[in-house]
C-alpha cells in the first residue's frame, strides 16, 4: 500500500494547493472526465479546498451511467428469455430500465449471474453447452480490451453458445461533444488516466488545438487530481492549450499496443447513443462483421423496444456538467440509491452516488482544511 500512500500525503497536498492558489488570477471551470476521479474529489473534499473561482465540473465518464436505456431494456428482454444465462458485472443489476432492472428479472426467474470477468462468462458457456450465455459488455476503452479478448477466445475455441451485448463508448468523441455544446462552460480537462493507459494520448492534441482547451492526463489518487488541476490552471493562466501527461507512471504516449490491436481485431467504430446525452458520432464500438455470430443483438433479434425515461430524472444534465447532483429536485428525495431514477445514483462511479454517499446534500458552509486529504 506504500505506493498508494505516497499519493495521499497531506503535506504534499498542501503544497499543491498553495501552488494552485498562487497561480490563479481569475475564475476557471475544469471538467474531470472520469467518475472515479469524481468520487476521489468528493470523498476527499478536493473541490472545497480549491481557491474561489476554480470550479470542478463532473463529466460523462461513468460507464454504467452512459449506457443507454434502450440497451438496458434489450438486456432485460434477453435475460428474461428461457434457456439464457445472462452475465453482468454487479453494478449493472440495479440500473433502472423502463419498467424494471436485472434484479427484478432474476427475482422473476431469470438466470442472471454476477461475474468478475468476461472470461468467467466464457467459462460458464463451456460448462453449459445446452444454454445460451450472454455477457453484458459495457464501458469505455478500459473494459473494452478484455471483453474483446473474450469474444476472440470464443471464436477461436468454437464456443458458439457465447454472445455479447455490446455498448462500448469512446472518450475523445465525448469530449468533442461536450465542447461543441452551446451551453459548455468547460475551459480545461482532466483526462482519464486509465483510458489513456490503453489508448495513449494521440487522439487528444487535435481536440486540444481545435477547441483551444488544455487536456491533462490525470490519475485517481488525491495528489494525482491536484497535480492535474495545477497543470491545467497553469496552462489556462498562460493562455496555452496543449496535452500534458501528469500520470506517467501508468500512461505511455502509445498506450498499450496489444490491447489496441485486440480492439481493432474484434470491434469497429460506430455511432453510439449515450444515456441522457443522445447519439454522438463515432463514439462507440460494435462487433466487427467477422465476429457477428457472437453479437447478442443479432442473435436474439431485440429490436423495436419501446423505452421511457422518467421525467423527473436529470442525469443527462449531470453527465454533461450542466447540473450538480444536489441541484436536482429529486436528489435524495424521490431519487436515492434504494429507489434510483437514473444510473448516476446507483453506479459506483456515478456523480449522484458520490454526492449521496459522502453526504454532499447541500452547499457546504465551512471551508475544509488540507489535512482532510488523506
Image (cartoon, rainbow, N blue to C red):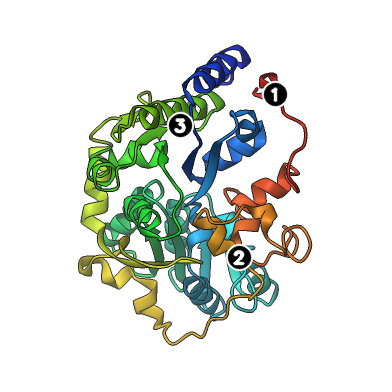
Cα distance in 3D space between marks 3 and 1? 19 Å
Residue placed at 49% from the left, 61% from the top?
Answer: 66
Q: Given this view, does label 2 or label 3 mark the residue nearer the observer?
A: 2
Q: Are discs 2 and 1 less than 8 Å apart at CB? A: no
Residue placed at 52% from the left, 71% from the top?
Answer: 72
Question: Residue under circle 1?
Answer: 372
Assign a secondary structure to mark 2. Answer: loop
Cα distance in 3D space between marks 2 and 1? 31 Å
Cα distance in 3D space between marks 2 and 3? 28 Å
**From the viewer's perspective, is 30 left or right of 102?**
left
- Which label belongs to residue 193? none
Q: Position of residue 251 (x, y in %)?
A: 33, 31
- Which label belongs to residue 314? 2
Nearest the eye: 44 or 297: 44
> Could you say which quadrant of the image residue 270 lies in?
bottom left
Question: How many residues crowd around disc 3 within 10 Å: few (fewer than 14), some, or many (20 or more)?
Answer: many
Label whose residue precedes the other's in the sequence (3 or 1):
3
Q: Which part of the image, by quadrant, shows the N terminus?
A: top right
Residue placed at 45% from the left, 67% from the top?
Answer: 134
Assign a secondary structure to mark 3. Answer: loop
Question: Residue under circle 3?
Answer: 219
Question: How many residues crowd around disc 1 within 10 Å: few (fewer than 14), some, or many (20 or more)?
Answer: few
Label whose residue precedes the other's in the sequence (2 or 3):
3
The answer to whether residue 291 is visible is: yes
Amino acid at each position: 500500500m506504500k505506493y498508494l500512500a505516497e499519493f495521499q500525503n497531506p503535506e504534499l497536498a498542501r503544497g499543491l494547493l498553495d501552488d494552485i492558489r498562487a497561480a490563479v488570477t481569475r475564475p476557471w471551470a475544469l471538467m474531470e472526465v472520469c467518475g472515479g476521479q469524481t468520487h476521489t474529489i468528493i470523498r476527499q473534499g478536493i473541490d472545497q479546498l480549491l481557491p474561489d473561482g476554480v470550479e470542478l465540473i463532473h463529466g460523462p465518464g461513468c460507464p454504467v451511467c452512459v449506457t443507454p436505456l434502450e440497451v438496458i431494456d434489450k438486456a432485460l428482454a434477453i435475460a428474461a428469455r428461457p434457456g439464457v444465462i445472462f452475465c453482468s458485472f454487479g453494478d449493472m443489476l440495479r440500473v433502472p430500465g423502463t419498467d424494471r432492472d436485472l434484479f427484478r428479472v432474476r427475482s422473476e426467474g431469470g438466470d442472471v449471474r454476477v461475474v468478475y470477468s468476461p472470461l468467467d462468462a466464457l467459462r460458464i458457456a463451456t460448462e453449459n453447452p445446452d444454454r445460451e450465455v450472454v455477457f453484458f459488455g459495457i464501458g469505455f476503452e478500459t473494459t473494452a480490451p478484455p471483453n474483446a479478448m473474450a469474444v476472440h477466445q470464443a471464436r477461436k475455441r468454437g464456443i458458439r453458445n457465447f454472445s455479447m451485448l455490446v455498448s462500448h463508448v469512446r472518450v475523445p468523441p465525448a469530449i468533442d461533444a461536450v465542447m461543441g455544446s452551446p451551453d459548455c462552460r468547460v475551459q480545461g480537462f482532466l483526462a482519464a488516466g486509465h483510458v489513456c493507459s490503453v489508448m495513449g494520448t494521440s487522439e487528444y492534441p487535435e481536440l486540444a488545438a481545435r477547441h483551444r482547451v488544455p487536456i491533462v492526463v490525470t490519475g485517481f489518487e488525491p495528489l494525482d487530481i491536484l497535480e492535474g488541476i495545477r497543470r491545467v490552471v497553469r496552462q489556462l493562466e498562460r493562455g496555452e492549450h496543449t496535452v500534458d501527461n501528469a500520470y506517467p507512471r501508468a500512461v505511455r504516449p502509445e498506450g498499450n499496443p496489444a490491447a489496441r490491436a485486440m480492439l481493432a481485431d474484434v470491434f469497429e467504430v460506430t455511432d453510439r447513443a449515450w444515456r441522457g446525452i443522445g447519439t454522438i458520432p463515432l463514439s462507440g464500438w460494435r462487433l466487427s462483421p467477422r465476429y457477428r455470430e457472437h453479437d447478442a443483438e443479432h442473435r436474439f433479434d431485440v429490436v423495436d423496444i419501446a423505452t421511457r425515461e422518467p421525467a423527473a430524472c436529470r442525469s443527462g444534465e449531470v453527465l454533461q456538467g450542466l447540473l450538480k447532483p444536489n441541484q436536482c429536485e429529486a436528489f435524495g428525495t424521490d431519487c436515492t440509491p434504494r429507489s434510483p431514477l437514473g444510473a448516476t445514483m446507483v453506479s459506483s462511479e456515478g456523480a449522484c452516488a458520490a454526492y449521496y454517499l459522502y453526504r454532499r446534500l447541500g452547499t457546504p458552509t465551512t471551508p475544509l482544511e488540507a489535512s482532510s486529504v488523506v
